[in-house]
Image (tube, rainbow, N blue to C red):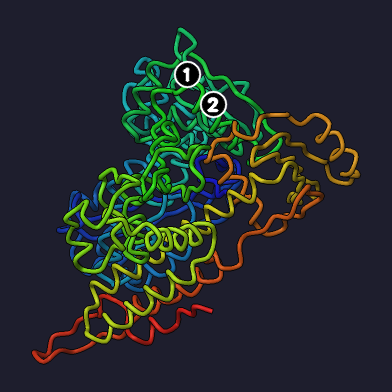
């Protein structure tokens, strides 16, 4: 199971962030009527100046007298300066992928965006920090009367006094930025993500709850938000518990229900885990046992569905929430009842199973029933008329398919696809292609989980990035133990210890989602089997070799060349071509 962390989980320390502090001088207040006359920029990281960029710009228009009086930049001063078109590419290169900082950033960024658009230069959409906004949040009114650059520069003891010249103002803004960062560091702002959240529209109450993340583990595990009564509100998992929990108190969290949850939460419990897989499994178990009100996914495993054959004289396919021991076969799980019903309809179509819900007596004869439309169309052998032997034959074929032999399903639907394609019935062919794909995926998933759950004990490990090993003991599809072998240590004693300490849970006490997570983990590159009490295998014809073919076929359909119809209009074929259908091999 591959786990990709969000940037909010990782965080970028402010000492490692490269900032480009920018200031522009212009001929007016709007980029629609005004032009840039001077650019000043300072690149800093970790408190050190890495470089500076400064140039006058010929605005190719007259500079208003009051602007010249304010800045000292006159028409004569910029007469020999380069135009913006010649400077802009160099400025964009200087900014690169740095975080852009400006005092009243909307003004400077607005001019730059307009300049890029008018000169056909791609705007890089940099991250932006506004020192005005940051100062308004970080400083109190009794400390500074306003947030003007000159006021803040004096308050922060800037060595450079702002004077409405671009480079000097940018240097003064650097001093203001560093002073503000020192101030907010005392409030727990240590990463760029923290800084972004600090300057966003986060309520003081939400920001105050950041202390709930203090002291939490920084490794993988599970976190549980709880209310004043100790009830679980939300259960989650992360590779870095502390960093992830902190994001719930920032603007990075935009889900409304999470805002409600944070307002109720009074503390956060954490369970450190040896691996990401253990954290995922513990999360699933906690959600199932505690039913936290703010967990939507994984809260109701009953939303999954299975297909079974009913136990009666003339069995039919039925969609159930969970397979029962009394039923001799089950097929799934499916993501929901609708998907399962569609798969059941496909199986009934291929094997001519009855779809009626009538109870058929074992004494039924040819005189017992008037039949139905499916019987008249030859789509059902007619058990309602006593044709039990013929009907049992199709039930046996459907049973074989559900037990892992899809050859008849594939050949029947493939022939149907070819027929539809030859008559240009692409939409209908696409529907049947998708139905076949869903059946094959369900078959592979069903037998993969069945095989995993049939193994009494399986031990596997995967190397970590640091050179150690993550070791898991799996019993009947359930995670029984997880251990971590540090780099350089002999993993075998740790394996033996994990086996000795592993849970002895009953085979039927397994969440389907847990088995799926374990199966996905076993499929990831680098996993090695240490020992297993039985072979981890699936039926040869359950469909695994067809998944790649179907995926390739779907991509081929999506990449089909645009066709031109008789009216000269272009269109893309909706369904599979005949060539696409014949790529599916039934052997």
Asked which secondary structure carries label 2, the reply is helix
Which mark, by number, is residue 232?
Answer: 1
Q: How far separated are the C-alphas under marks 2 and 1?
A: 9 Å
Q: Residue at the location (20% across, 52% down)? A: 369
Foreground residue among 430 and 520:
430
Q: Disc 2 or 1, which lies upstream in sequence?
A: 1
Q: Identify the residue shown where x is 39% and y is 30%.
A: 135
Disc 2 to disc 1: CB gap under 8 Å: yes
Residue matched to label 2: 286
Vertical side of 100 occupied by 133: above or below: above
Report whether 432 appears left or right of 393: left
Count neighbours of disc 2 (C-alpha within 10 A) and say few if under 14, some if 14 to 19, many if 20 or more.
Answer: some
Question: Residue 501's spot in the image, x, y percent?
Answer: 80, 29
Compared with 383, 474 (above or below) is: above
Q: Residue at x 75, y 48 (%)?
A: 460
Q: Position of residue 394 (x, y in %)?
A: 41, 62
């Amino acid at each position: 199971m591959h786990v990709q962390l969000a940037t909010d989980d990782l965080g970028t320390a402010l000492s490692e962030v490269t900032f480009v502090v920018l200031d522009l001088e212009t001929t007016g207040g709007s980029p629609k009527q005004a032009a840039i006359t001077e650019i000043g920029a300072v690149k800093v990281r970790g408190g050190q100046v890495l470089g500076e960029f400064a140039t006058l710009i010929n605005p190719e228009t007259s500079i208003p007298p009051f602007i010249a009086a304010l800045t000292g930049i006159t028409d004569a001063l910029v007469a020999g300066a380069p135009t913006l078109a010649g400077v802009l590419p160099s400025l964009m290169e200087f900014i690169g992928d740095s975080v852009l900082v400006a005092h009243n950033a909307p003004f400077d960024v607005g001019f730059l965006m307009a300049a890029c658009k008018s000169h056909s230069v791609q705007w890089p959409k940099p991250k932006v920090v506004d020192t005005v906004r940051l100062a308004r949040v970080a400083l109190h009114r009794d400390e500074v009367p306003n947030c003007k650059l000159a006021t803040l520069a004096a308050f922060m003891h800037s060595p450079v006094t702002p004077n409405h010249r671009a480079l000097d103002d940018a240097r003064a803004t650097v001093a203001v930025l560093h002073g503000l960062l020192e101030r907010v560091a005392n409030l727990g702002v240590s990463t760029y993500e923290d800084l972004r959240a600090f300057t966003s529209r986060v309520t003081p109450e939400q920001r105050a709850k950041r202390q709930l993340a203090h002291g939490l583990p920084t490794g993988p595990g599970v976190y549980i938000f709880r209310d004043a009564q100790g009830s679980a509100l939300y259960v989650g998992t992360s590779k870095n518990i502390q960093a992830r929990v902190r994001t719930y108190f920032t603007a990075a969290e935009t889900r409304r229900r999470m805002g409600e949850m944070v307002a109720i939460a009074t503390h956060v419990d954490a369970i450190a885990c040896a691996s990401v897989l253990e954290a995922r499994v513990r999360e699933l178990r906690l959600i199932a046992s505690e039913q936290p009100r703010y967990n939507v996914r994984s809260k109701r495993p009953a939303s999954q569905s299975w297909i079974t054959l009913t136990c009666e004289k003339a069995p039919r396919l039925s969609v159930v929430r969970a397979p029962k021991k009394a039923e001799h076969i089950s097929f799934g799980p499916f993501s929901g009842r609708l998907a399962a019903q569609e798969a059941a309809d496909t199986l009934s179509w291929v094997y001519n199973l009855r779809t009626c819900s009538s109870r058929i007596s074992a004494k039924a004869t040819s005189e017992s029933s008037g039949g139905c439309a499916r019987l008249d169309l030859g789509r059902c052998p007619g058990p309602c008329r006593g044709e039990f032997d013929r009907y049992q034959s199709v039930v046996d074929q459907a049973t074989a398919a559900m037990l892992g032999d899809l050859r008849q399903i594939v050949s029947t639907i493939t022939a149907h696809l070819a027929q539809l394609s030859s008559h240009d019935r692409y939409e209908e062919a696409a529907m049947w292609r998708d139905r076949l794909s869903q059946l094959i995926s369900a078959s592979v998933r069903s037998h993969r989980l069945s095989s995993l759950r049939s193994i009494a004990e399986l031990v596997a490990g995967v190397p970590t990035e640091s050179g150690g090993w993550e070791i898991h003991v799996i019993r009947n599809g359930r995670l029984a133990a997880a251990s971590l072998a540090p780099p350089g240590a002999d993993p075998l004693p740790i394996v033996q210890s994990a086996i000795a300490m592993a849970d002895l849970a009953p085979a039927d006490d397994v969440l389907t989602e847990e088995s799926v997570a374990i199966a996905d983990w076993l499929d990831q590159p680098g996993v090695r089997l240490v020992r297993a009490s039985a072979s981890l295998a699936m039926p040869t014809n359950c469909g695994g070799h067809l998944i790649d073919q179907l995926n390739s076929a779907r991509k081929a359909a999506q990449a089909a060349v645009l066709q031109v119809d008789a009216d000269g209009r272009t269109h893309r074929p909706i369904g599979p071509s005949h060539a696409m259908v014949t790529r599916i091999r039934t052997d």
